Image: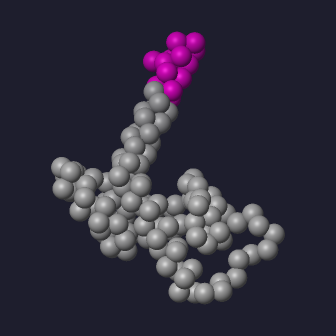
């Protein structure tokens, strides 16, 4: 979950979740690539090897949680969309620079390894307790 704060349009602020996939069979998300083009160029200039980086694949959704009792009504669509795009650019650029996708994959692998180890340990204990081979 990401917190968005200090925006020119207060209705954009709040907590949001980003839904995405990293499934290799899907194409990289061109919208995100276009949105954070400058961040990608800067990271490549700093020595990042883009082909080895993890990137958003397929569709990406950002869902903001609104806890206000009165929903926001768009007053100036151009201004609101412009502010939303700027906010999205900052959010995805930060995720890119901090290598959050890679860190998340690493955490997933660790959790999977722990789960598999727990199953192996359980099987060993059960086989010793019940004398199964």
Q: Nearer the viewer, residue 90 or 113?
A: 90
Residue under the image location 66 percent in, 71 percent down? 11
Magenta stretch, overall SS = helix
Residue 120 placement (x, y as % from top left): 46, 25
Above or below, 103 against 4 in this view is above
Q: Which residues are magenta?
A: 118-133
The quadrant the C terminus occupies is: top left
The answer to whether any part of residue 105 appears in the image is no
Identify the residue at the far right of this view. Answer: 69
Residue under the image location 31 percent in, 61 percent down? 39
Above or below, 2 against 7 in this view is above
107 lies left or right of 72 = left
Above or below, 115 against 49 in this view is above
Residue under the image location 29 percent in, 66 percent down? 38
Residue 100 placement (x, y as % from top left): 41, 49
Q: Is residue 40 magenta?
A: no
Above or below, 99 against 11 in this view is above
Residue under the image location 58 percent in, 87 percent down? 77
Residue 9 placement (x, y as % from top left): 61, 72
Residue 123 placement (x, y as % from top left): 51, 23
78 lies left or right of 31 = right
81 lies left or right of 43 = right
């Amino acid at each position: 979950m990401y917190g968005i704060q200090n925006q020119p349009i207060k209705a954009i602020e709040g907590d949001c979740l980003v839904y995405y996939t990293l499934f290799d069979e899907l194409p990289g998300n061109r919208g995100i690539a276009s949105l954070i083009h400058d961040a990608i160029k800067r990271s490549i200039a700093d020595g990042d090897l883009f082909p080895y980086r993890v990137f958003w694949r397929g569709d990406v959704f950002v869902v903001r949680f609104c806890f206000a009792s009165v929903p926001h009504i768009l007053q100036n669509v151009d201004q609101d969309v412009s502010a939303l795009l700027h906010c999205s650019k900052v959010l995805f650029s930060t995720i890119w620079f901090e290598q959050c996708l890679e860190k998340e994959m690493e955490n997933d692998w660790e959790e999977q390894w722990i789960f598999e180890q727990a199953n192996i340990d359980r099987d060993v204990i059960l086989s010793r307790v019940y004398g199964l081979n």
